[in-house]
Image (tube, rainbow, N blue to C red):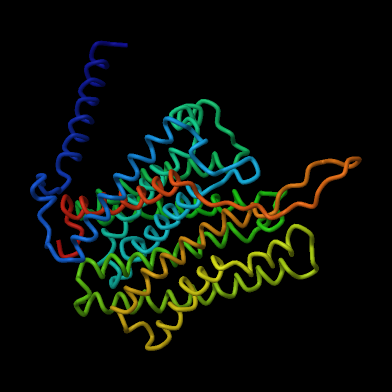
Amino acid sequence: MSETTITADAVQEQSFIAKAKEFVFTIPVNKVSIKDLVDFEKTPRNNFIAVLTLAFIAMFVVGVAIYLSQGHHAYNVTREHPWGLLIAVYIFFVVSSTGLCIVGSLGDVFGFKDYELIAKRAIFGSIVTILAGFAVIAFEIGHPVTMMIYNVLSPGLTSAIWWMGTLYGIYLTFMIIEFVFLLKNDMKMAKIFGLSGLLVGLAAHSNLGSVFGFLNARPISNGVFYPTYFILTAFITGIFIAFIIMGIRYKNVFPEAVKTMLTGLAKIQALLISILIFFVTWKMLTDIYGGMPNRADVALHILGSWTFWAEVILAMVIPLIVILKDFGKSHVLLVWVSLAGMVGIFFMRYNLVHDTQLKPLQMMKIREYQLAPEWIHYFPSATEIMISLGGVGLCIAMYYVGTKVFNLDADH
């Protein structure tokens, strides 16, 4: 190789590095000090949220310290019930992330002008929620650093969980790049990376559903239902969070453009919840019909649990009734209904994880007497609860800092 070629390659490399530096250093951000972060309107609501957020983060620190000293013995998971609250909370956050990605894509990817108002907030929210989910699941995995290393060195191509982690990593990368281009107001590149992130996110989320659908030993979960159900409930969750975000941003006093957007989202939400009720109804009917062991009895047990009805009433029935009352024009009421809906969504995720493990697996004994199996009981430990609430605190804190550092309004 000639000296001229080496020099040309060096110049090209330096040019690339210079362009990368220029790209990074020209991202529009606000200079924020510690004083700016604590400088917010001291209303009772804001003070309550601030104190609650700090308390949750403190719980996270304590919970992580207990986990690091005791390991999984700090959790109430067992061999019979290996998936606990942290798995449910992880799903809660990544479902929220995918839902916000879908909501954000309505404006900058699909070109619906009414929804461009929330594009930056939704995409930033999708980044924040998935980071919170990763923060929680990191302390459910035994060795998260080793996992990341061997995820690359020895990929498990037949493992749904491997694909889930890999796709979510790619999805997060695309979301960050899309958000940067949105900040730079480069809508062409934002659309490219937004569409790429949306497709990868939907694949990752559907794959997360397949983690449950592939459980051949658990007839209550096995099948094609959950990969589709996860996408549907993600969109529903994203719209709930969109109402909460805009309610906080405008203090429930909405400009006309925001009212138009929220009314449109409410109508979409009514359709999605109607489809969800249809899906869940037929899922329960097909589970019960025929009395199949380990499926029909589990479905009947689920129907008798209060957590299932909390999910149905808070996340489906109440929001649908409120929207249909005046076709989504009660915007302030829908903000509060969305808060209740998110509680219902949490129960939806918790039920998904817990109900899958309700019926203990039978041991392969054919010559010895075996007692009839009982339902498995599980309640999260204090450590699990602290880490889970800490994830919520981290999510709120990261979003708040983002509102200070970045200009998230469309008019900027």
Q: Quadrant of residue 39?
A: bottom left
Which residue is at the front of the view, 21 or 258? 258
Label tally = 0
Q: Quadrant of residue 137?
A: top left
Of all residues, the one furthest to the right in this rendering is 367
> Where does the image place residue 77, in percent across and percent down from the top left?
56, 43
Taking the spot 16% from the left edge, 37% from the top edge, the residue there is 22
> Where does the image place residue 327, in percent across and percent down from the top left?
38, 85
Residue 328 versus residue 404 in the image, above or below: below
Of all residues, the one furthest to the bottom in this rendering is 326
Q: Horizontal placement of 385 versus 59: left or right?
A: right
Q: Quadrant of residue 198?
A: bottom left
Taking the spot 63% from the left edge, 69% from the top edge, the residue there is 304
Q: Quadrant of the C terminus?
A: bottom left
Residue 270 versus residue 375 in the image, above or below: below
Taking the spot 77% from the left edge, 46% from the top edge, the residue there is 362
Which residue is at the front of the view, 64 or 326? 64
> Where does the image place residue 162, in percent across and percent down from the top left?
54, 39
Q: Quadrant of the N terminus?
A: top left
Taking the spot 65% from the left edge, 68% from the top edge, the residue there is 283
Q: Horizontal placement of 153 versus 221: left or right?
A: left
Q: Horizontal placement of 260 versus 225: left or right?
A: left
Q: Horizontal placement of 394 versus 387: left or right?
A: left
